[in-house]
Amino acid sequence: MKVLVKADILGRNENAAAENAALLARHGIYALNLLGSPGAGKTTLLEKTLAALGGELRTAVVEGDLFTDKDAARIERCGAPVVQINTSGGCHLDAAMVAAALARLDLTQLDLIVIENVGNLVCPAEFALGEDAKAVVLSVTEGDDKPLKYPLIFKESAAALLNKCDLLPYTDFDMDAARRDIEALHPGIAVLPVSARTEDGMAQWLAWLRAAVAAKREGGAR
């Protein structure tokens, strides 16, 4: 019975995600589901991304958190439209929540929507939101063993950002081992070492994102 209940929940979510995807496709908007653990640096990465692309891509953010609007307030200061979703303890966003958020945005004025999911390496990977792609942020302070411990999120993501590389000298993180494990889980994934704080590696990430948005505009989402 538990399996049937989960199948029903995921089935209803898939239907809602398909509706979101169709809505975004009609407007030519690229949607990215940004995933990662609490403290991985997702919001800082997003702040730096918005600062770099602000004059180039019309971007909005859907901000998912269990409680508070602290991250949404940070994004709002970047000048991007932002919609806060509080899950009140839920470990992930679902497609219905995102549909409600999309209804609060002017989709005619956007090129890119970034959905910053709840900090979690497990549940968010299972729930499609109608996005074009997922990107996972893993900080070097979390350890290079995490890809094999939490494989689904890396299998589902089109890009893996290995963040906080400025702290590498102070950790035992093995960059080569992490890259090998991630690429073994998902051949073809973009593995991008970055430091959102110092902005090292950001050029590669921004190039990846620009290419994804351009592909959606041309009718072939990445």
Image (cartoon, helix red, strand yellow):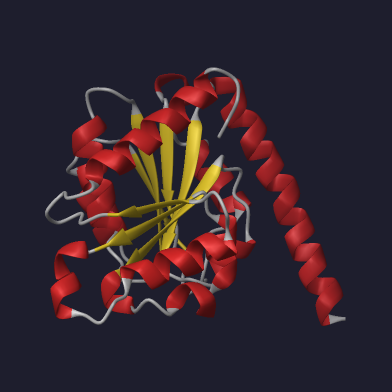
Above-or-below relation of 20 to 149: above
The mark tally for this picture is: 0
Residue 3 appears in the rendering: yes
The residue shown at (22%, 64%) is: 164
Compared across the picture, whether 61 is left or right of 128 comes to left
- Could you tell me which quadrant the N terminus lies in? bottom right
Between 205 and 130, the one lying in front of the other is 205
The residue shown at (26%, 76%) is: 141
The residue shown at (86%, 73%) is: 4
Compared across the picture, whether 206 is left or right of 112 comes to left
- Could you tell me which quadrant the C terminus lies in? top right
Q: Residue 27: give x, y in percent of width and height.
A: 54, 21
Between 197 and 130, the one lying in front of the other is 197
Q: Residue 210: give x, y in percent of width and height.
A: 37, 30
Compared across the picture, whether 43 is left or right of 125 comes to left
Q: Within the image, what quadrant is residue 77 found in?
A: top left
